[in-house]
């Protein structure tokens, strides 16, 4: 009986089986990799915006497109600001994977903000468009284009739509702006839905000076 009791006690004190330990280590490594990837993405996005700000300032001064780095397939076309939230981001031309890795992109086939139709700007929810979770109807958006024109928009609605059936018409009458990102906003994997913020133009300036009645 004593030998049986000792044997049972020893079995309880045995270390976990090797497969279980290997699985735990693997899960830990995966977790660290994901955290590292997330930190890398945020660091890259932040550094890119610093370089893009410099390139955009040069575009404003020269009136010419300026790439932030020589091998880029895109360049800054505007600056988007949300005064209430203190949020700001340089907008790039196009919505390619490379462009969206460094900043929001003005999708090809949509007009420049302030021109007739609906401009569509897309960005990742976990970097440049994290502020969309705090946006609300009535918020003002300020868009400074590379040609120096400043356009003010007021947010009118938000919606969740399928990625391939957004209902956005780039050629619609009026002067609209849509900000788009993946949904849900707190998800860590890609989904097939998009969160869109709709806005309408309320004013336009042809210089950096404040227009009469424009929000500051």
Image (cartoon, rainbow, N blue to C red):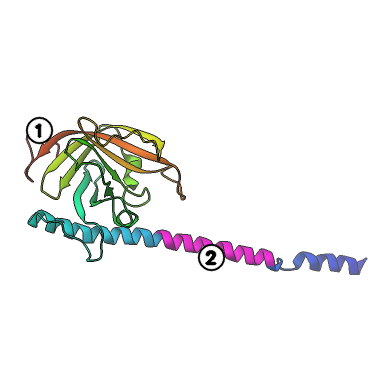
> Counting other residues with Cα less than 10 Å from the Cα at mark 1, is it few (<14), some (14-19), or many (20 or more)?
few
What residue is drawn where x is 24% and y is 42%? 110
What is the quadrant of residue 161 in the picture? top left
> Counting other residues with Cα less than 10 Å from the Cα at mark 2, is it few (<14), some (14-19), or many (20 or more)?
few
What residue is drawn where x is 71% and y is 66%? 17
Sequence-wise first label, 2 or 1? 2
Element marked by disc 1: loop
Where is residue 50 drawn, in percent x and y?
23, 60
Element marked by disc 2: helix
Q: Quadrant of the C terminus?
A: top left
Where is residue 78 drawn, in percent x and y?
19, 49
Q: Give the extent of the magenta segment.
A: 19-38
The numbered disc on residue 33 is none
* Residue matched to label 2: 29
Is 32 within the magenta? yes
Is 157 within the magenta? no
* Residue matched to label 1: 213
């Amino acid at each position: 009986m004593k030998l049986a009791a000792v044997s049972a006690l020893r079995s309880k004190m045995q270390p976990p089986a090797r497969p279980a330990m290997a699985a735990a280590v693997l899960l830990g490594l995966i977790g660290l990799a994901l955290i590292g990837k997330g930190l890398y993405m945020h660091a890259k996005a932040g550094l890119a915006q610093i370089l893009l700000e410099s390139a955009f300032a040069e575009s404003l001064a020269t009136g010419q497109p300026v790439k932030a780095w020589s091998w880029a397939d895109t360049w800054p076309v505007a600056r988007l600001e949300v005064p209430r939230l203190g949020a700001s981001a340089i907008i790039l031309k196009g919505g390619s994977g490379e462009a969206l890795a460094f900043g929001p992109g003005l999708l090809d086939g949509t007009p420049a903000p302030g021109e007739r139709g609906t401009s569509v700007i897309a960005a990742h929810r976990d970097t440049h468009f994290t502020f969309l979770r705090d946006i609300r109807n009535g918020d003002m958006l300020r868009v400074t284009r590379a040609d120096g024109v400043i356009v003010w928009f007021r947010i009118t609605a938000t919606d969740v739509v399928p990625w391939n059936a957004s209902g956005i018409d780039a050629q619609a009458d009026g002067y609209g702006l849509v900000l788009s990102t993946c949904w849900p906003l707190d998800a860590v994997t890609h989904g097939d839905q998009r969160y869109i913020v709709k806005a309408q133009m309320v004013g336009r300036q042809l210089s950096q000076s404040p227009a009469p009645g424009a929000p500051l």
